[in-house]
Each structure stands twice: as structure tokens, then as C-alpha cells.
Image (cartoon, grey):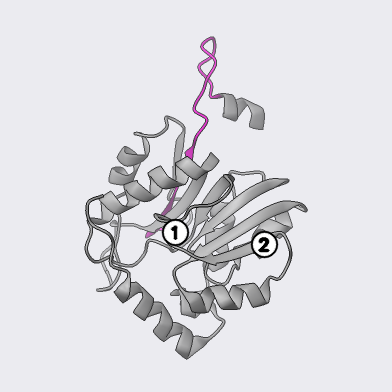
Amino acid sequence: MKQQPDYTAINTFYASRYKQWGYSPKSLGWDKGNQQVRFDVLTSQYSFEQKSILDIGCGFGDLLDTISKKASQFDYTGIDLSEDFIKKAKQLHPQPHCRFFTEDILTFSPQRSFNYAIASGTFNLMLAGVDQYNYIEEVIKKTLQICTDGFAFDFLSDKVDYRKEETFHFSPEKLLSIAYKYSRNVMLRNDYMPFEFSLFVFNDDSFEKYDTLFCRYKTQK
């Protein structure tokens, strides 16, 4: 990506909401109370027991509550552009298996790899200075470099009749086309909300020639 994204408007947006709402989903842009639905969908395809998770755009680390219900032992790292969110997340989740950093995923240089990455609402706002699809592809490439198993990201859909000025709505078809550059084993879920969807990409797209079933699929049966 030739140009670096300009995060000024995004940082201003979240700083303003945090000043108004404090520790609340509303500070993250979630005004309708559906945050848990998104978390349930994004965690629906993985086993988190004894796994490491990277939460991109982690906000206050609220995803931890959902993962804790699915696994007793896991390692969690949350990154976010907002220093306010990270400071509050550290206060809320002081457990030794949880770490938080003020980082941009594109420049993040972890000392270790992760099993999975999850991003909820991270890509909802319009970015200045870059093509939004080029940006997402760079994020996908970086994520698959540092995550051994795959990722789950959610997006606003362009199949809508109303858009806010500050939001960006993605074409599911275009994102699927990008995803297929990096794996044959992909999933898109648009079955839980009409105007949002989640994209899953799995690093392991190996299959057995005799039955042409993905190896990952068979191990889950």
C-alpha cells in the first residue's frame, strides 16, 4: 500500500464518544445493543481452549467475556488505536493472560504468533488517505502472517438503503474475491443481520484428494 492511512478522523470520533459515554458500547459506536450478537458470530467457528487470540480494535476488551465462556485457558492480546480505550481495558482486565497495546495492526510487530485474530467494528469508519479495499487487503495479509489458523472480521454491508457520512459499507462480493487470494477455505456469514456480515478466512485449506473435503472440516466433525 503506497499511502499510509490517516487515522485522525477515527481517533477524533472515538475520543469524542468516550468523553460523552465513558465505559459503554456507545463509545465504540454500538448504539443498538447488538455487540454480543457480533461476538457470538465471530467466535462461532473456533475452539479457543489453550489458544492465543489477537483482538484487532479491541476497544475495552469486552470480547474477553465471550471467550471466557468458551475456554478456561487461553491467551489474549488486544490492540487499539485509542489510548483511552487501552488504558480502560487494562484496568478492567488485569489478568496475567491478557495484554493490551496501543497499536496499528499494519505496524504491529508482535514477539510471537497467534492462533486467531478477531475484529469487530474495527473497519466501520471511513479512512482518509487510502482506498478502503486496498487497506483491508493489507490488513488481511498482515493478519495471516502473524496468525497461524485464521481470522474473523465483521463489516458493514453495502446492501443497505441508508448510510452515515462517516461509515464505509463493503461489498461482500469484493471482500470474498480478496479472501480467495489467500485461502480456498473461507466463509461469509450474512445470516444474523441484514446490513452487516462476517468474513472468516482459514489458513489451512488442505484437503484429501480421495473425498475433496477440507482437512479442517473433517477434524471438526
Locate residue 165 relative to residue 218 in the image: left or right.
left
Is 202 colored magenta in this rendering? yes
* Mark 1, residue position: 193
x then y, percent, for residue 69: 72, 58
Range covered by the magenta-colored residues: 193-214
Residue in the image at 42% along x and 29% along y: 184
* Mark 2, residue position: 98
State the predominant SS element of the stretch in magenta: loop
Is 28 colored magenta in this rendering? no
Q: Is residue 87 above or below residue 61?
A: below
Residue in the image at 71% along x and 71% along y: 94
x then y, percent, for residue 159: 29, 56
Badge 1 density bin: few <14, some 14–19, many ≥20, Cα 10 Å: some
Residue in the image at 54% along x and 14% along y: 211
Q: Is residue 61 above or below residue 204?
A: below
Judging from the image, what secondary structure is the residue with disc 2 in? strand
Q: Is residue 200 visible?
A: no
Locate the C terminus and report the quarter of the image it occupies. top right
Please name whichever residue, 206 or 213, is drawn nearer the observer in this view of the structure: 206
Q: Amino acid at mark 1?
A: Met
Please name whichever residue, 126 or 43, is drawn nearer the observer in this view of the structure: 126
Label 2 to label 1: alpha-carbon separation: 30 Å
**Badge 2 or badge 1: first in the primary sequence:** 2
Q: Amino acid at mark 2?
A: Cys
Q: Is residue 198 above or below residue 125?
A: above
Q: Is residue 146 visible?
A: yes
Asked where in the image residue 148 lies, by quadrant, the reply is top right
Locate residue 54 relative to residue 129 in the image: left or right.
right
